[in-house]
Image (tube, grey):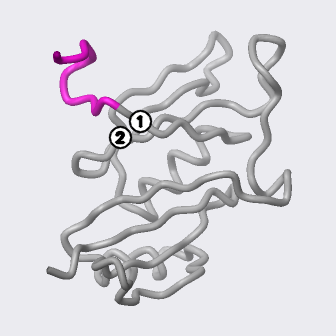
């Protein structure tokens, strides 16, 4: 049975929280090559939601410190720990790493062949969100 969703939207999508969504969008598009799929600004003109895409990968961005609707949330940098990450498959992980590093991304693990069959590198973004980019070896 096919689950209804917007055209091109995967069935599962990571949702990350940022203090400044516009700043996160600028960082993720410049540093990791995402494009803006959708964004929504509030009456004050400030972004309150965005959807980014890289190939078939879609990531949603929302605000930290929500007021009363849900639990308060913080970035990994604010809370001092990671609770998850985003794993993105690419065609050329080494070239992606080089471009991200040139853009000033904090690379936590340079490209390396992993025992499960991927060549992967790990990085963090401006909010401390954990990103893993990989190309299958076989």
Residue at label 1?
A: 13
In the rendered image, which quarter is residue 76 located in? bottom right
Q: Position of residue 116 (x, y in %)?
A: 34, 77
Image position of 66 (left or right of 4) = right
In the rendered structure, are the residues bearing label 2 and label 1 in contact, judged by CB atoms less than 8 Å apart? yes
Q: Which mark is residue 99?
A: none
Asked if residue 24 is among those painted magenta in the image, a careful observer would answer no
Residue closer to the observer: 102 or 128: 128
Image position of 48 (left or right of 112) = right
In the depicted structure, whether residue 125 falls above or below residue 78: below
Residue at label 2?
A: 58
Image position of 66 (left or right of 38) = right
Asked if residue 7 is among those painted magenta in the image, a careful observer would answer yes
Residue closer to the observer: 132 or 47: 132
Q: Is mark 1 on a helix, strand or loop?
A: loop
- Residue at 39% across / 79% down in the picture? 97
Q: Position of residue 41 (x, y in %)?
A: 55, 20
- Residue at 40% across / 89% down in the picture? 112
Q: Earlier in the sequence, mark 2 or mark 1?
A: 1
Residue stretch in magenta: 1-11
């Amino acid at each position: 049975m096919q689950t209804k969703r917007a055209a091109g939207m995967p069935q599962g999508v990571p949702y990350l929280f940022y203090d400044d969504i516009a700043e996160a969008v600028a960082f993720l598009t410049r540093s990791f090559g995402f494009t803006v799929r959708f964004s929504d600004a509030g009456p004050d003109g400030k972004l309150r939601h965005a959807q980014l895409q890289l190939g078939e990968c879609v990531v949603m961005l929302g605000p930290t410190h929500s007021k009363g609707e849900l639990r308060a949330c913080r970035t990994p940098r604010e809370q001092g720990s990671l609770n998850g990450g985003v794993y993105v498959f690419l065609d050329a992980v080494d070239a992606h790493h080089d471009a991200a590093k040139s853009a000033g991304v904090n690379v936590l693990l340079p490209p390396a062949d992993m025992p499960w069959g991927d060549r992967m590198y790990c990085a963090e973004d401006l909010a401390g969100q954990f990103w893993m980019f990989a190309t299958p070896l076989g």
